[in-house]
Image (cartoon, helix red, strand yellow):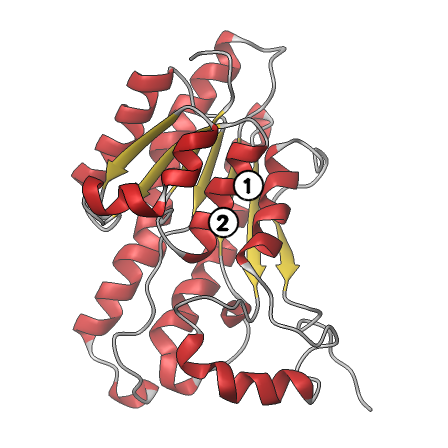
Amino acid sequence: MGKKKVAVITGATRGIGNAIANKMADEGFAIVACGTMSPERADEHLKEVKAKTEFLYVQADMSRQEDRENLISAAVEHFGRIDALINNAGVGSAKQENILDVSEESLDRVMDINLKGYLFTAQLAAKQMIKQVQEDPQGERPVIVNMSSISSYTLSLMRGEYCMSKAAITMLTKLLAFALADYEINVYEIRPGNILSDMTLPVKEKFDKYIAEGLHPLRRWGTGEDVAKAVAAICLGYLPYTTGSAIDVDGGFHMKWID
């Protein structure tokens, strides 16, 4: 079990996280998948991953410190190392309401998972990664990937908590990258755009029209596989001289243009 590189992926049972788990398994990584589903329910969602590689599922709520600690300790106990942490678990606003009406409870819920979950999981994983680097100075360097969004810089007045949490991930990525640079542990932010998934199906018809009219230059929905390929490129070491940077997987949405 110790020969394969190990990727820990939060929010791996659905959507983008599930696509990442499958792609990383294809690339030969052992997978530690995390989600809030029971192991029995998660098994159905992750059976393809399990068939491809060495695998461990850990049920965890990333807003809870004891669950975060259990995730990282289980990964190390089972595989002996962590080569990639993909912070992907996240939630949107529980209900759409104007920023002037957002409750403290709603803000806490989003920030506890989307920001605190990322920070404190990264802290735990980074300590293990530093240990690995110190024990094997010539070995391959681990990486951390934080899943953000175009909402980190794009206003959505009715989803203010979500936008604020994603903007915070941009700064968190830079802070972690700076703190870990001496160990050559690179940290990256991925900013997906309009990704077709079960979470975006309710607005598909509306966004089909926007995309066709040129919402972004590549006039199609993105897929979980599009995001997974960017994550795999990072974890395979194809961006060794890049850290603290955001990678846009958004069909060109981030570009500003005038017709």
Q: Amino acid at mark 1?
A: Lys
Query: In the image, which disc is placed on residue 23?
Result: 1
Q: In the rendering, which numbered label is found on residue 177?
A: none
The secondary structure type at the circle numbered 1 is: helix
Q: Which residue is mark 2?
A: 19
Q: Position of residue 20 (x, y in %)?
A: 50, 45
Amino acid, disc 2: Ala
- Residue visible at 78% across and 83% down? 257
122 to the left or right of 182: left
Question: Between 201 and 124, which is closer to the camera in this rendering?
Answer: 201
Q: Secondary structure at mark 2?
A: helix
Q: In the rendering, at what x and y percent does residue 36 appear?
A: 23, 49
Q: Quadrant of residue 241?
A: top right
Q: Relative to the observer, which residue lies in front, 100 or 250?
A: 250
User: Residue at 35% of width from left, 49% of height from top?
Assistant: 13
Label 2 close to label 1 by CB (< 8 Å) = yes
